[in-house]
Amino acid sequence: VRASNPLPVRVYTRSIHTPPLFTAHTTTSTMCISTPLIPRIHTRSVQTLDFGGTKEVVIERTDYPRDKLKEIFKNDTMAVIGYGVQGRAQSLNMRDNGLNVVIGMRKSTEPGSGWELAKKDGWVEGKTLISIEDAANKGTVVLYLLSDAGQKQMWPTIKKYLTKGKTLYFSHGFSIVFKDQTGVIPPSDIDVILAAPKGSGTTVRRLFLEGRGINSSVAIYQDASGKARERAFALGVGIGSGYLYETSFEKEVYSDLTGERGVLMGAIYGLFKAQYEVLRANGHSPSEAFNETVEEATQSLYPLIGENGMDWMYANCSTTAQRGALDWYPKFYSATKPVFEDLYKSVKQGEETNLTLKANSDPNYRKNLESELKQIHNEEMWRTGETVRKLRPERQSK
């Protein structure tokens, strides 16, 4: 796809958000070299915005500055259960935001274990790095960030520490919505809330450190205290969100599982693979097939969509590319929409939950997963990608 010149030219305009000025601070965390770039002036308030014709309330990070977060949670201990990609990122962000955080996990002295990683990140064994049971007991807010299968397995242990007045926090609605399969049914005298970052833990941490913050959804399942909603949004900011929108546990998990299996991961890989194989079967070289399938998409076109939308990307490509895309997208739409409808039905009916819990509970899951990922890694397309990425200009000087 040849980009038309000059890039900014098009026949209509749209306002583009300009980020505020930020100030850098330092931290002792080994996951980063700096703490969040905190806005200098609190200028925003809760807003009702128009999303394509639908009004929605949006909460921004500046609605809960650091001092306000510390005041809201001044009497709380945040007990993060699990130190995977989300647990690690969210706990470090909360710590950098001045909250009182402890990590609960199984002790292991094996090199590369989560326990050893937590120690490298500055958590102190016996004080802020403790057993799951001790953390659940000590925490007034229990952030349940184990894997979905792990949450099911550990629930009988965790539940007995969820005494009246505590808050149970999730970053995924899976265990609550599919409680018939997970057995996760919270006591009625606690708050149950959710803040779900729209990205991996790595991105949660990275955007926080860049002074931006990730988009997240917030939901309230139980409000025993009468303060669950404010605390949910505040904690959403505390874990590193830039802006937050409200949803329900059900809608969060249905959209999340659909997105992961669809456009975000499963569908996009399927499309990449299909186009690459067609190009190769018709005599195109590996480098040409990869560049026209993956590299140009991720390095040139998708960033334009992220900047200002699909129409913006189309407007900044050649007329030949525009015409072809506009003519062919309806065919792809018609071919794939039934697949997405089947996918959503599978998610909503709990079929995906059953498959996930069954696979993740298999004692050989990690070994099987590594085998599947190795198979993808060894495909010609991705081996070609390794070479192509080395040729990127920014990598040539390294």
Image (tube, grey):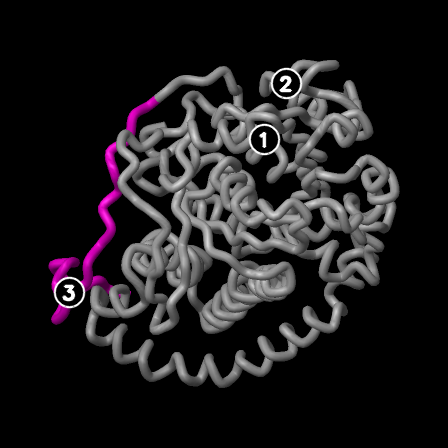
Label 2–label 1 contact, CB within 8 A: yes
Cα–Cα span, label 1 and label 3 = 41 Å
Residue shown at the point (79%, 25%) measured from the top left: 134
| Disc 2/disc 3 C-alpha distance (Å) | 49 Å
Q: Is residue 332 left or right of residue 349?
A: left
Q: Is residue 10 inside the magenta stretch? A: yes
Q: Please give the residue where the numbered disc 1 appears in the rendered image.
A: 91
Measured as percent of width and height from the top left, residue 380 is found at 55, 55
- Circle 2 sits on which residue? 123
Q: Position of residue 394 (x, y in %)?
A: 32, 36
User: What's the magenta bit mostly, secondary-structure-wise?
Assistant: loop
Is label 1 in a helix, a strand or a loop? helix
The residue identified by callout 3 is 13
**Image location (x, y in percent) of residue 299:** 35, 52
Q: Is residue 333 above or below residue 359?
A: below
Nearest-to-viewer mark from 1 and 3: 1
Q: Earlier in the sequence, mark 1 or mark 3?
A: 3
Q: Is residue 235 magenta?
A: no
Q: Which image quadrant for residue 88?
A: top right
